[in-house]
Each structure stands twice: as structure tokens, then as C-alpha cells.
Amino acid sequence: VKAQVRPAWQEKPHPLTSTAKAVAIAVVLALVAVPFLVVVSTSLADPADVVANGGWVLWPQHPSLAAYSEILSGGIVGRATLVSVVITVVGTALSLAATVLLAYALSRPAVFGGKPIMLLVLFTFLFPPGIIPAYLVVKETGLLNSYAALIAPVLVNTFNLVVMRGFFQSLPAELYEAARLDGASELAMLARITIPLSRAVIAVVGLFYAVSYWNSWFNALIYIDTPAKWPLQLVLRTYVLAGGQLADPSAGEAGLLAAPQTVQMAVVVLATIPIVLVYPFLQRFFVKGVLSGAIKS
Amino acid sequence: VAAKTRSARSRRWRRDRILIAFMVPGLLYYAIFHYGALFGSGLAFLDYVPFLGLAGSRWIGLENFQRLFGDADFWHATLNTVEISVLQLVFFFPAPLALAMLLHSLTHTSIKRFVQSVVYLPHFISWVIVVAVFQQVLGATGVLNGFLADSGLHTVHILGNPDAFKPMVIAQVIWKDTGWGTIIFLAALTQVDEQMYEAAALDGASPWQRFWHVTLPAIRPVILLLLVLRLGEMLSLGFEQFLLQRDAVGPGAAEVIDTFVYYQGIKSGDFGFAAAAGLFKGVFGVILVYAANKIAHRLGESGVYR
């Protein structure tokens, strides 16, 4: 374990203080980790063990993947997972493209309309659209019950835009001057100067978009009527929290209802996995301080 | 002169036409989904009938607002919102600061890194999953009640209990976002000048005195800034959490302004009335931000904007 050298002026901590600190850290870690452990264990457990223990297990005695093969063998969860993956991938790509382009244009000094546009963008921070007017706009643009309704209304996140524009502005102006003397177009400068030098901030903004697309369910709740088009989080909400039945009505409900707890927890795990997978990458950027620097600005 | 500026502007337009093309997708988004929606807020002054549309519906002035202000359910939702906001301010707001202090005091950097990775994670988990996890731990057939029953103790009715709802949602926010909230405090704490601590220690200041007279003044601007932001957001609680649990405990405990708008508008189809509630919240939110910013200036801080 790497330890920093204690500066000479700092007194050695009292053993009681050190113990209290260690206990506090252990409690914090347990409060975060144990709930996850219970969820994963329950999803992997034998349904009979779960019932015998009153609805949960801390550790699966007879681990099995039955719950997972059940939810992934077609039916509504498999379908919803596919919807979520596609919305996340397509949405992130479109959001990132729109954000980079707008942030780049607004980062160029004295660009046509730059100041008023920036003010109009920042005003949306202060006055976000209400649920009802937003619904009305989606309805009037004919997007109701289409996948586009899950992307278009959240295409650009103003916070992400501001962070990205700030980063672009911090790049040395001489690079652009030199490129301009070489006759480079704006597109060439964006592709050869801005994007290569901003990989980290683009990556972190992309991950933020991906996480928010993956986690979102409310827009699907109000804009999408057909359950077959629902993303995973909304299915999770309906079948785990609201106590609906997971079985596809046409497929019969045998088996699924016999062990709802293991199956429900398997859906929870399925919805969490992508977040845990991208988390180390997100984490790298916190360590680099990209984010705290961005937040401070 | 006017002709000159006009030609200068058209020159800039021609010079920047590629940059303007870059802006198009983003600007369309803002125009349609933010400013279009802002325009759509006019719904609050209409007797909106979906079939007739915005143009065909009757203008009724402030009638929706009169109904709103006479509606006991709306005031109840507002009261719930403010109450939960205040509870968050008292119990959730200090939590990241406390955890940041604890993390900052750790001398082993690798332990510190590890704890940080673990406590940031819940921030990225969706509310749907957080509520499902809480159900699994604190629900009737959850971990806590399992333990209590095994130890021969009384089981507790937490989830689905309207009386326990408010402490419950605070606990959920603390679980989800305390770790994430430490980032900004940790950044502030690392910027405190080491020499200040050293000088204070040489003058015989105890650790507690050093905290009170060195650490706290140094991170005061950050604390105040976050307080101001929180105050401005008083009426926005991130309503996913409430919508997810409202059915279980009923509107008496869980109705906040946002869920009120959702149920009145989307669920019951009373669009003009719900839009009035939403507009009231929006305008009041702007006033709150303005007031909070003024307070920050009074306290000698720069606030969110000048």
C-alpha cells in the first residue's frame, strides 16, 4: 500500500481516531456493496432457496443461470434489451456529433451570431421545458410512438455543450492560425486539430450521453404506447416495481411466475451490467481530473 | 452606416457559412425542443382540446391559474416538494462534505482511490434500479426484515408506508449521490494551501482548530455556490424517484409538483391546467435562482452569474 509521507507538523493520529476512520470507511463500503451483492446473488440463486430464505439470499448456495436464460430466451426482456442497445448506440452517436459541431462553431472567435446563440443556449439552463409543453412538441412534430422520440428531445445536453466548448476554447489559438495559413478549411481544422486534441473530453461526454440514454425510461413512458418498443428500464419499472407480470401473455406464464424474485433480480442485473462495464473508463477521466476541471469552469 | 454594417454582416455570414452549417443540427434541437416548448407553454392560457390543437383551442386567460391556486391537491404537492427539498438540504447536503473530509484525511492513496471508485458508482445507476435495489433490501421480504425476523425481532414496514416515505427518499438520495457529490469538495480540499496548515500547526492550533480556521474558510466559496444552486432548484427534485414510488405510498406522501403535472396532464388529459402548474414551477424557479444569486452576492461570493 502506497502511503504518503506525513508532514512533520502533523501530529500522529490517536489510535482511536484511526480505528473510527477505518470503521467509517468499512461501513460506507458495505452500504454500497452489500445491496449489489444481494441483488446479484439472488439472481443467481436457486428459486427454492430464495423462497426458503424469505425473498433474498446473500450468497447463492446452488448457483444457476436459469433466470438469465429465461429472460433472454425471447419475450419482452430480450426485445427491450435490443431496443435499449440500439437507442444508446445511435443516440450517443447523434448527440456527440451535434454537440461537437455546435461546440466547435461556438468556440471559434467572433463567429457569426456566436454571442446571442450562446445566450439563448444558456437561458435553457434557467428555464428547462416543462413536461406538458415538451409532450406537445413531440406530438406536433409527429414523433409520438417512434424511436426518434427517445433521442430528438434530448439530443444536446447544455451542460455537456458548455463543458466541450470551454475545452475547445482552451486549445492554443496559434494552432488554428497556422492551419489557416496553410489554407485549411474549418472542417479540416475540426478533424485534424480540435478532435485529436480533445479526445478525453469527447470520450467523457460520450460516456455521459451513453449512460443517460441507457438509464432513461420517462420519455419512453410518455411518448411510446407500444410495449414492444419499450426500452429495458421501462420494462424493469413496469414488471419489477409496479408488480406487473413478466411473462409474455401469448407465451403462457408457466415458470416465470414461480420464481419472480430471481427473475426480477436478473433483469436488474442485466440493466446494470453496461453501466458497470463502462464505469472503469469513466473512472479514468475522474482520475485525470478532466471532469473536476470542467465542473470548476 | 447601416448599409456598411449590413455588408459587414453579410461578409461575416459568407465567411462563417461552414461554421453556421455546423450549428444547424444543434440549433434546430434548441429551437424545436426548448424554444418550441417555451412557446407551447402558452397552453397554460388555453382551454386546450387536443383535437382542436393550439390554434383552435379557446383562450381563457388566467382561468387555469385561478383553478390551480384554488386546488388543495396542488398546494399539497407544493408543500411536499418544499418539505422534501428542506429535508434534503439538512440531511443530504452535508453528507458529501463529510465523506469528502473523511476521504481527504486518508493517507493511503490506493485505499482512497478504491473507496472513491466504489462510492461514485451508484450515481450512474438509474432510479429504476436504485428503487428496485432498495425494495430488495428494505422491502417486506427484503434483507433487513429477513434479519429482524431471524433474530426474533419485530419486522418493520418501510416501503409502501406513507409515514416512512420522506426519510426513505432522503436515504435513497444519500445512497445514490453522496459519493458523486464528494468530487467537487475533494477538488476544493486539495487546493487548500499546505503551508497554511503548517503555519497554523506551528502556532499550536489543534486539528479541530485547523479545520475550523483553515479548511472551512478555504472551501466556503464552494459550499456557498452549491447551496445557492440547490436553493435555486428547490422545486425540482428529479421527479423520477417520486413517480416510481408514488403508486406504492399514494399521492398523499409522494405527490410533488412534477408528478402532479404528469398525472393531471398526461394521465388525465387536463393539459392546460397541468401546463399552468408547470409554468408556475418554471417561473418560480427562475425567481428562486435570481434570489439565491443575490444572496450569494450579499455574502461576498461571485454566485452563479454576475
Image (cartoon, rainbow, N blue to C red):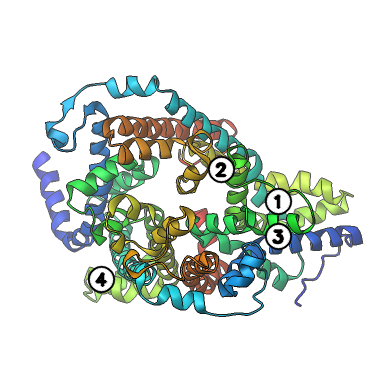
Residue A46 x %, y %: 59, 75
Kindly state the secondary structure of the residue where label 3 is placed: helix
Residue A27 drawn above or below residue A81: above
Q: For mark 4, what is the residue?
A: A180
Q: Is label 3 or label 2 in front?
A: 3
The residue drawn where x is 39% and y is 45% is: A125
Q: Which is more N-terminal, label 1 or label 2?
A: 1
Whether residue B270 is visible here, answered yes or no, is yes
Residue B151 x %, y %: 79, 57
The residue drawn where x is 21% and y is 71% is: A185
Q: CA distance from mark 4 to mark 3?
A: 54 Å
Kindly state the secondary structure of the residue where label 4 is placed: helix
Kind of residue at badge 4: Arg
Q: For mark 1, what is the residue?
A: B98
Q: Is label 2 or label 1 in front?
A: 1
Q: CA distance from mark 1 to mark 3?
A: 12 Å
Residue B67 location, quadrant: top left
Q: For mark 3, what is the residue?
A: A28
Q: Is label 1 or label 3 in front?
A: 3
Kindly state the secondary structure of the residue where label 2 is placed: helix
Residue A176 x %, y %: 31, 69
Residue B35 drawn above or below residue A182: above
Residue B212 location, quadrant: top right
Q: CA distance from mark 3 to mark 2?
A: 26 Å
The residue nearer to you, when weighing B59 against B200, is B59
Kindly state the secondary structure of the residue where label 1 is placed: helix
Q: For mark 2, what is the residue?
A: B225
Q: CA distance from mark 4 to mark 2?
A: 41 Å
Disc 3 is attached to a residue of which chain?
Answer: A
